Structure formats: C-alpha cells, structure tokens
Amino acid sequence: MIGAGPPDSELRKGQHMHCIVKLRSLTRFCLAVMLTLAIQGCSVGSDSATTSSDGSSSLNASGELIPVKVELVTRAVSKTPVLIAYDKGFYKKYGLDVTLRMPKGEFPGAIEMREEMDSPDFSIDGGVPMITAILAGRTKRLLLASTDCDVRFNIVGKKGMKNLEDLKGKRLGISSDGAMTGFISRLTAKRMGWQLGKDITIVEQSPRFDDLVAGKADAIVADDRYMAMAEQAGYPVLADTSEWKEHIPGNGVRVEWDWIKDSKNRDIATRFRKGTLEGNAVFFTDRDEALRVLAKYHGMTDAKVANEVYEQGLKMSRDMRPCVEGIDKMYELYDSPEMRQYKATDFYDDSLWKELESSGLIANLYK
C-alpha cells in the first residue's frame, strides 16, 4: 500500500539497533571520563594528598584528616589562639583532626575536656617549666613557637599594700619555682636586690586569687585570670611586670625532641603552626570573637573579667617566634651545673618559624 510504513517487526529491530549504538557511545564516554579522573588522581603526588589554596597539602595519604593530640596544660589566655583555631576549623583546613585536653575550668559553665591523653603530639605551656622538667630528667621537649616572650604577669598584694617595697619580709605566692611564676619571683628578687628566703619568702602551690584571699600569701604572681579576679575585687597591683621589658621563655607550642625529627611529624607541625597562627591573628584583630571563645570554653561570661583577661592577652607576641632571648635569661636566673650541660638551641627549633615568616604567611594574616 502506498504510504505504508515498515512492518512492526522491522520497526522494533531498527529501534533496538539505535539503542545499542547509543549505549555503546555512552559506554565509551563513561570510560573516557573514568580514565581522565584516574589520571588526575595519580598526578596529585606520591603521597596522594590534596592541596589547599596556600599550596600546603591538606590531607594524608588516605585522603583523611590526620589525628593529632593537643594538651593545654592550663587555661591561661595564652592558650586562646589554639582554642580559636580549634573552634573555627583552622586545623581541619590544614588537614588535622585535633583532640584537645584541658584542665578543670575556674569559671562555671567552662567546657570540660579532661579525658586522659598519653603522649600528646603538642603540649601547650611555658618554656620555663619545660626546661626545668628537662633538667630534672622528666622529659625532653623543645619550643616550636611562643605566645609570650616578655614577662607580663602582675604582682597583686593584700588590701592595704601599695607598692613592691611593701612586699619585703613578706610571702609571695607562686605555682612552683620551675614555673613562669617562679621565674618572675626570681626576677623580682634580682631587680629589688632581695635574697630569696631571707628578704622574701616564696610560697609554692599558692598562685591563685583564692590563695591570696585565704591568707596563704601576702601577694601572688597573678596570671591574667587571677589578675582580673583581683582587680574586680579591689586588690592592689604592686607591679605590672610588662613594664620591666624583661624576656622570658613563656607559653608556647612544645614537642618531644625525637618526635620532631620524623619528617612526617615535621609536616604535621607545620600544619599545626599555620592553624595556630591564624587563631592568634583572630585573637588580635577580632575582640568579639576572642571574647566569644573565652565565654564558650572557659565560662568567662562576666564582661569585666573577660575584657580584662583579653587586655592582658594583647601583650602576647603576634608572630609567635620561639623565645630565644627568654631562654638566654633563664641561664642567668637558673644557673646551675645541670643548666650548663645544655645549649640554648637544645630548647627550641625556629626553623619552621623562619620558613613561615619568609613565605609571607605571618605578615599577610595582619593585612
């Protein structure tokens, strides 16, 4: 019949062949895409790590975040850059999955992170206790970075005292002789020409504002937290040690000597330094964000106390260079045969800092 189409069987056969051709084309396309992705994946690098926008590899060989253990030995304001970096995801940005440990908080509502932690990768605390622990044979760590290279704690006295001269013949409360408060007690005696144990009595395990109120000491070397509490309660500041312009191996990022020798750990340390530097920059440039973190993790919801703690923190170091001059000062104040067995370079490694400083990363954070 004129105008009639092909029989149904031929029509179905033609449609079937057309589908086969399309399927083969689709299969070839999928295989091409898979091959391209495979080639791209192999070209990333020998460790198969991804790369972040700043050129640093952000994940480990399996494409996962690298687990890292971090111990904050105290809750002083000098630890806040680490908390900011943790809270804002800076460490994850650099490929690290950080687990934190902190001691019990002094304020109600403080977040507790007190799970046991054996052999932390990074210990955040003072260079003074680090060095005294080495001299005692307890551990061997070194500083990779520092938030405090100048003394800045305040000496706070009982009500009725007016100046540092009023402290002569009385008791000064510190945490321990091998702590930063002990360093400052030795420095105070040296500046005043006093003999420890004769002109002034040092009371260890009494650094807190509560110790001063309880009468355990006539004055205390007060860190930022206890300084803020004392000021709010009307206790007199006998000396603001930041005015002395004296160096100290203060709070910093500490690692084991053997740990940092491993190239993989050195890469982890670089990642951690970058994240912490970003946290430090936020502390200095965004008061509201710093206060939010202080309230969230430490329970510092009193505006006056939190702002005073923050003001004390503004005396910290911006570039976080290891405190070489502070270590030199330690040789003067803690001179001993044990101390002289070590070189200053045994207590710090500034090579990572130099790498980051020369890259422009530190300067760019404050532009």
Image (tube, helix red, strand yellow):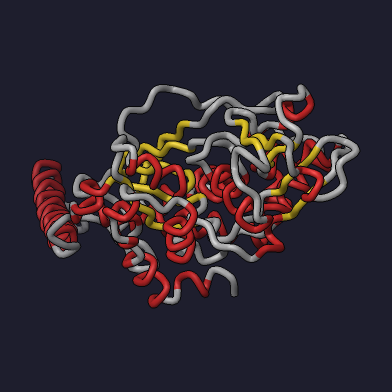
Q: What is the number of callouts on the image?
A: 0
Identified at 64% across, 29% down, the residue is: 206
**In this image, 2 relative to 188: left or right?**
left
Position in image of residue 354 (x %, y %): 37, 71
Q: Classify 17 as above or below 233.
A: below
287 or 223: which is nearer to us?
223
Residue situated in front as seen by the camera: 39 or 73: 73
Kindly indicate the quadrant of the structure image that contains residue 351.
Answer: bottom left
Residue at the farthest front position: 198
Q: Is residue 335 left or right of residue 285?
A: left
- Vertical comparison of 227 with 4: above or below: above
Residue at 10% over, 50% down? 20
Counting from the top left corner in percent of width and height, residue 302 is at 81, 36
The percent position of residue 127, horizontal first and vertical second, equals 45, 50
Q: Is residue 275 above or below residue 97?
A: below
Direction from residue 340 to residue 78 in the image, left or right: right
Query: Residue at the spot x=58%, y=60% of the render?
Result: 150
Q: Visible in this render: residue 314?
A: no
Res. 52 visible in picture: yes
Residue at the (34%, 64%) spot, across then down: 352
Which image quadrant for residue 367? bottom right
Looking at the image, residue 312 lies above or below residue 172: below
